[in-house]
Image: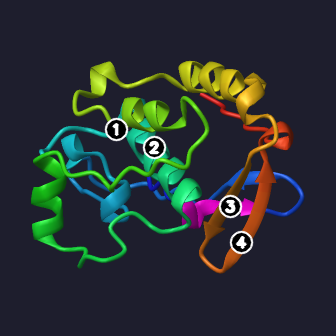
Amino acid sequence: MDFHSGNIFNSGEIAIIAFESSSSDDEIYGIIPYVAPEIFQGNKYTKASDIYGFGMIMWEFLTGRRPFWDRSHDVDLIIDICDGLRPPLVTNAPEGYIELIQECWHPDPNNRLTADDIKSKIEKIIDSESTANKVLSCSLGYLTKELKWTNLTITINE
């Protein structure tokens, strides 16, 4: 799937749209930073591949920057991603958020979280007293919003 922040829209309700389908099982499509390394290594897209992309979106929400904004999206970036490169982690995150991102980025797709795992962990982060009043600044292209953790709702359909 083509899972990246440009496919997330908010018109009163958050929606993920415009997933593209490939005409060939061997074709790689998507925006390089959001494509899981195993896809570049010739494996098929799976739910775990989407979880990797979701981790990149979480990083983008946290930092307000697109992953690897400072690099050309070329074969060198692909090689570096396959060798384990991930965007730099920051320290100004709610407790548990960085760990959640890292679990989504796990190099082994079999060790990545499931959508249900993510939902449970996000609910724990939201319920945590230390994060109840934190504000997350989110940048999605030209749209910038402030989301209070207590008002954040995520729906994941598998």
| Mark before the other along the chain sequence, 1 or 4 | 1
Residue 54, x across and y down, in percent: 49, 44
Q: Are marks 1 and 2 in contact (CB under 8 Å)?
A: yes
Q: Which residue is mark 4?
A: 144
Q: Main secondary structure of the magenta part?
A: helix
In three-dimensional space, the C-alpha distance between marks 4 and 2, rounded to whole angstroms, equals 19 Å
| Image coloring type | rainbow
Judge by depth and name the residue closer to the eye, 123 or 29. 123
Judge by depth and name the residue closer to the eye, 60 or 54. 60
Q: Residues within 10 Å of mark 2 (few under 14, many from 20)?
A: many
Judge by depth and name the residue closer to the eye, 17 or 14. 14
**Residue 156 relative to residue 84: left or right:** right
Q: Residue at x 12, y 69 (%)?
A: 75
Q: Is residue 31 magenta?
A: no
Q: Which residue is mark 1?
A: 105
Q: Residues within 10 Å of mark 4 (few under 14, many from 20)?
A: few
Q: Residue at x 37, y 65 (%)?
A: 31
Q: Which residues are magenta?
A: 5-9
Q: Are marks 4 and 3 in contact (CB under 8 Å)?
A: yes
Q: Is residue 152 above or below residue 30?
A: above
Say what amino acid the circle numbered 1 marks. Answer: Trp
Which quadrant of the figure has residue 137? bottom right
Q: Which residue is mark 2?
A: 55
Circle 3 — which element? Answer: strand
Say what amino acid the circle numbered 2 marks. Answer: Gly
Q: Is residue 29 above or below residue 104?
A: below
Q: Are marks 4 and 2 in contact (CB under 8 Å)?
A: no
Q: Residues within 10 Å of mark 3 (few under 14, many from 20)?
A: some
